[in-house]
Amino acid sequence: MIEAIVVAAAQYIVLETLDGRKIHVNPKHIVSTTTTKGKLVTDAVQCIIYTSDGRFFAVVETCDSIKSRLEEFGVR
């Protein structure tokens, strides 16, 4: 039972939002990323990810680090 949970959890990338919440995103559902480069109200947001269901998330990780993690999952 525990092994199944570990396998399922390994299929998600954990990202941090501006307010410190952790979100779990399936890497296969990320369709694009945009570097903010200080264009938003705060410099804390480094990247915006867009998902296949039309939602987007502002996160504190850089787009380069997210793309590296996507490559680890064989996405892109």
Image: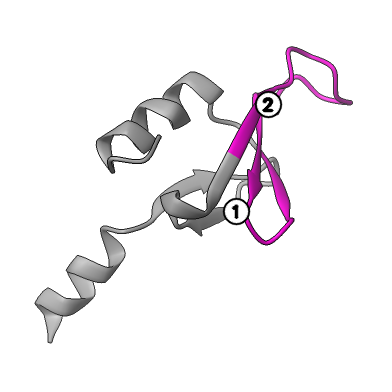
Judged from the image, the secondary structure of the residue bearing numbered disc 1 is loop
Image position, residue 32 (x, y; %): 61, 36
State if disc 2 and disc 1 touch (CB < 8 Å).
no
- The part of the image, by quadrant, that contains residue 18 is top right
On screen, 54 above or below 47? Answer: below
Type of the residue with mark 2: Thr
Q: Residues within 10 Å of mark 1 (few under 14, many from 20)?
A: few
Q: At 54% across and 56% down in the image, what residue appears?
A: 23
| Residue mark closest to the camera, 1 vs 2 | 2
Q: Is 40 colored magenta in this rendering?
A: yes
Write the start and end of the magenta stretch as one range.
32-58
Type of the residue with mark 1: Arg
| Relative depth, front residue between 1 and 32 | 32
Q: At 43% across and 49% down in the image, what residue appears?
A: 27
Residue where numbered disc 2 is placed: 34
The single residue placed furthest to the top in the displayed view is 37
On screen, 33 above or below 74? Answer: above
Quarter of the image that includes the N terminus:
bottom left
